[in-house]
Amino acid sequence: DVQLTQFPSSLSASVGDRVTLTCRASQRISNYLNWYKQKAGRAPKLLIHAASTLQTGVPSRFSGSGSGTDFTLTISSLQPEDFATYYCQQSFGGITFGPGTKVDVK
Amino acid sequence: QITLRESGPTLVKPTQTLTLTCSFSGFSLSASGVGVGWIRQPPGKALEWLALIYWNDDKRYNPSLKNRVTITKDTSKDQVVLTLTNMDPEDTATYFCAHRTFGLLSGFDHWGQGNLVTVSS
């Protein structure tokens, strides 16, 4: 099974900050990596698929990069609605989710 | 507009079998390339994928649960059913169903609101 590690597990940031989240796979997974945002008590929302392709309707302040084992999700200027938990998910070997990174208010 | 909605019990006893139904609209599970999956999330914890079924009845399961989980579809009713046997308190979670397009590069792009299931005697 492909395992995913996310770091940091949590971070505190302010509105307007540039934020970078990392996801690392236990083996090479090409670009079969997706990113989700989840607000408390809500279903996850797909932000990015195939490591760097923005879903329709997702603001351009979100971007994804990486290939192989190391991936990043960047929020260029954090907005109030971006305080949430972010999960990566791979589909190269089965389907697994990472443990998440919680972004909260500094 | 794609929508999905989970339905089923909110409380089950240990050793019982859980049956959840995902009712959807805005797409057909008989259309090529379409899939529906189940994902769960214990309170305060991360997401865990359980099962996935495609338009051609191709079924995929999380190996850690394979002996306990079954996914089926009823195309005429636009429904997907998940059964999980021998429920344990550690299976307490919110269970989501979600739409996915066939292909390794696809994510779960539409989700239901979730159904919280508590396992307790």
Image (cartoon, grey):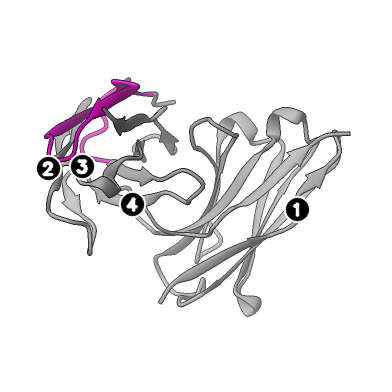
Whether label 2 touches label 1, CB < 8 Å: no
Q: Nearer the viewer, residue B6 or B53?
A: B6
Label 3 chain ID: A
Residue A5 covered by magenta stretch: yes
* Disc ID at residue A46: 4
Task: Kindly state the secondary structure of the residue where label 3 is placed.
Answer: loop
Report how far apart the C-alphas of labels 4 and 2 lie in the structure. Answer: 19 Å
Label 1 chain ID: B
Neighbourhood count class around disc 1 (C-alpha, 10 Å): few under 14, some 14–19, many 20 upward? some
Report how far apart the C-alphas of labels 3 and 1 lie in the structure. Answer: 34 Å
**Where does residue B19 sit, x and y in percent of width and height?**
75, 53
User: What is the quadrant of the C terminus of chain A in the image?
Assistant: top left
Neighbourhood count class around disc 3 (C-alpha, 10 Å): few under 14, some 14–19, many 20 upward? many
Whether label 3 touches label 2, CB < 8 Å: no
Whether label 1 touches label 4, CB < 8 Å: no
Q: What residue is shown with label 2? A: A77
Q: What residue is shown with label 1? A: B19
**Closer to viewer: mark 1 or mark 4:** 4
Q: Earlier in the sequence, mark 4 or mark 3?
A: 4
Q: What residue is shown with label 3? A: A51
**Where does residue A46 sit, x and y in percent of width and height?**
33, 52
* Residue type pointed to by label 3: Ala
**Closer to viewer: mark 4 or mark 3:** 4
Task: Kindly state the secondary structure of the residue where label 1 is placed.
Answer: strand
Left of A37 or right of it: where is B13? right
